[in-house]
Amino acid sequence: MVLFIAILYFVLLSWLATKNFKTAVGLLICALPSYFIRFNIGPLPTSALEITFGSIFLVWLIKYGRNDLVELENFYREQRFLCWAIKAFFIFSILGIFISSHHVQALGIWRAYFLEPILFFILLIGRRRNIGSQDLIWFLSLSTVSISVLAIMQKLTGQFFSPTLRPQDLADLHGRVTSFFTSPNAIGLYIAPIVPLMVYGLKDEKRKKFYWAIIFLALIAIVLSFSEGAWVALAVGALLALCLNRKRKMVVGILVVGLIVAVLVAPLRKNLMFQNQSGHNRLVLWNYTWNYLTKTPKNFIFGAGIKDWFDKVQKPVNDFTKIEPLLFPHNTFLNFWSEIGLFGMILFVLVYVFALKESIKKYYGNKILGGAVLCMLAVFMVHGMVDVPYFKNDLSFLWWTLVAIIFI
């Protein structure tokens, strides 16, 4: 039955992509959280997200790939260094499979976190004359609606949580919401980088009311998740937006007041100084990771390998009565370094720098769009200092969609 439903869904989505490719891409972006719908086709594990991507990519390859090759060649000439950085990043991501001691599982994770999202980026660049940045911003904004609505329903009813959460997991949430996910922080990791783009969308008079409603729902969901990393990241994004709009005196005033409040209010001071439990745990995780990476030259260069951070880094030294088992060290640089090695991490940073450079260039040509993508990049990186903004099925697709918006 599962196989029949999967095949039927694949066929219907392929038909839609053939008739209206832009709508199919929008459906894929709106369905990014659907990775949690998992099943097997024979011995192969997959998800609704992968089936969605597979059908759309296959149609693109057959129907548009040859024609879009010209556009991809033009993009390569325009962004030669970016393309080389992405190629090298992709190659080093493959090395993470071989460094891992779980080759088969690492291959599946690599496919979901690196292969498919980068292919989607290539597809979007190839179709950039037909699917513009405005379209992608609209699709991403729509993708937050189901996440936000479910989060609000969870708060109002105390129900509709992921079935994979155990009673003890629900008790440990202490009133926080998770939406489709198993962690409250996942809400902020997905929605927060999109918020600046939603604000940019307000300039679209036809959709202005819809954008206001979506922003309202998104901010409520982030508040209910109690994701402090997302709150701080959005605050930094807002301050950057004020700076870009030449409100520097206001920014200085806010920072001074914020500093005074942080000094006087003990809980806030502890949070900012990593003296609360969550902050302390992150310092411990970072210390574990740094100790592992600097233990041998091999560890320093190649990391632990895809899916091996827990087994090689946390498990041997962790006190599980204090810190739960985790998959990543919760820092963008250490996440990439431990998964795909030093050069993989450096190349990701290089892609980020190219995106930042292009965003600054856009800002001088279009201050509203350029400011929005600059704030988006700031939110992504600030939140990434204390969490995992890439290594999840939906978040890896989200990142490469955000990069595509910058370069379209």
Image (tube, rainbow, N blue to C red):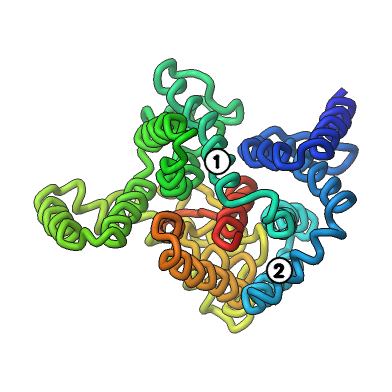
Above or below 56: residue 253: below
Between residue 23 and residue 281, name the one nearer to us. Answer: 23
- Please state if 46 lies on the left or on the right of 328 as rendered: right
Real-space Cα distance between discs 1 and 2?
A: 28 Å
Which of the 4 image quadrants contains residue 299? Answer: bottom right
- Asked whether the viewer can see residue 288, the reply is no
Q: Residues within 10 Å of mark 2 (few under 14, many from 20)?
A: some
Q: Residue at x 64, y 74 (%)?
A: 79
Above or below 78: residue 219: above
Q: Farthest residue in the bottom direction?
A: 297
Label 1: which secondary element: helix
Between residue 70 and residue 305, name the one nearer to us. Answer: 70
Q: Amino acid at mark 1?
A: Trp
Q: Amino acid at mark 2?
A: Phe
- Please state if 28 lies on the left or on the right of 205 as rendered: right
Labels 1 and 2: the sequence-earlier one: 2
- Please state if 59 lies on the left or on the right of 328 as rendered: right
Q: Residue at x 61, y 77 (%)?
A: 343
- Mark 2, residue position: 90
Above or below 402: residue 70: below
- Mark 1, residue position: 138
**Residue 75 x/y as whole percent:** 69, 69
Which quarter of the rendered picture does the N terminus lie within?
top right
**Residue 17 x/y as whole percent:** 80, 39
Q: Residue at x 25, y 59 (%)?
A: 273
Q: Which mark is residue 24?
A: none
